[in-house]
Amino acid sequence: MTIEVRPATAFGDVRTLVGPKSPESNVCWCLSYRIPSKLNNELRGPDRGAYVAELCRADPPPGVIAYDGDEPVGWAAVAPRSDTSFARNRKIPHVDDLPVWSLWCIRVRPGHRKKGISHALIAGAVEFAREQGAPAIEAYPLDSGDARVDMTMAYAGIRKNFERAGFSYAADTTSVLAGHPRVLMRLDLTPPRRAPK
């Protein structure tokens, strides 16, 4: 299986990965951290999908999609932290004033899990942020150790997967998800400086 990760410009594929079965449903659509809570509460049913369709047409698009051939099998939300609710989140600290990007949601479709897709999504999100000029990328995964994590709450990712991708622990948070503390993990994306000759 060869997984390719591409920017999330195809709304139909995003809908397959994070949209509801019923268009009238008020599921997340991966908007809850992306937009202010007031707007998130106001957007109902089909308006949520319409909002995401606009995001897919924007530059940059709202994240990346993992494909197995032509089939969308995974999603990762990644954007400048300043454009998300993490910009004002009191539970997730700011390490410094760099205009970092946030990677906050990783979702692999049922039937495609345990095949390395989440690892490909993290790598693809990192590359996407780098191409957009991000100086660093952050994630806020669960620090669950060896404990099992409920799949519905595993969207934040788990610490060891980010460590495997080269992220380093940067700070504790006061955020808890599914009974597990979240930590701030970070990866510097600035190219190494060359020593003068």
Image: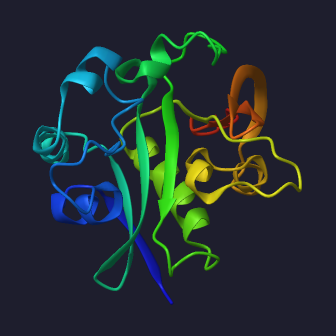
Colour basis: rainbow
Residue depicted at x 24% and y 66%: 13
Where's residue 71, x and y in %?
A: 31, 80
Q: Quick one: which residue is furthest to the bottom in this view?
A: 1
Q: Is residue 112 above or below residue 126?
A: below
Report whether 123 appears left or right of 12. Answer: right
**Relative depth, front residue between 136 and 47:** 47
Where's residue 82, x and y in %?
A: 40, 18
**Relative depth, front residue between 68 and 180:** 180
Q: What is the total number of numbered labels drawn onto the structure image?
A: 0
Report whether 3 appears left or right of 148. Answer: left
Residue depicted at x 89% and y 56%: 146
Q: Is residue 17 above or below residue 25?
A: below
Which quarter of the image is occupied by the C terminus?
top right
Residue depicted at x 45% and y 33%: 134
**Relative depth, front residue between 46 and 136:** 46
Report whether 89 appears left or right of 74. Answer: right
Q: Quick one: which residue is furthest to the right in this view?
A: 146
Q: Is residue 116 above or below residue 171?
A: below
Where's residue 79, x and y in %?
A: 39, 35
Residue depicted at x 17% and y 57%: 11
Where's residue 176, x and y in %?
A: 71, 29
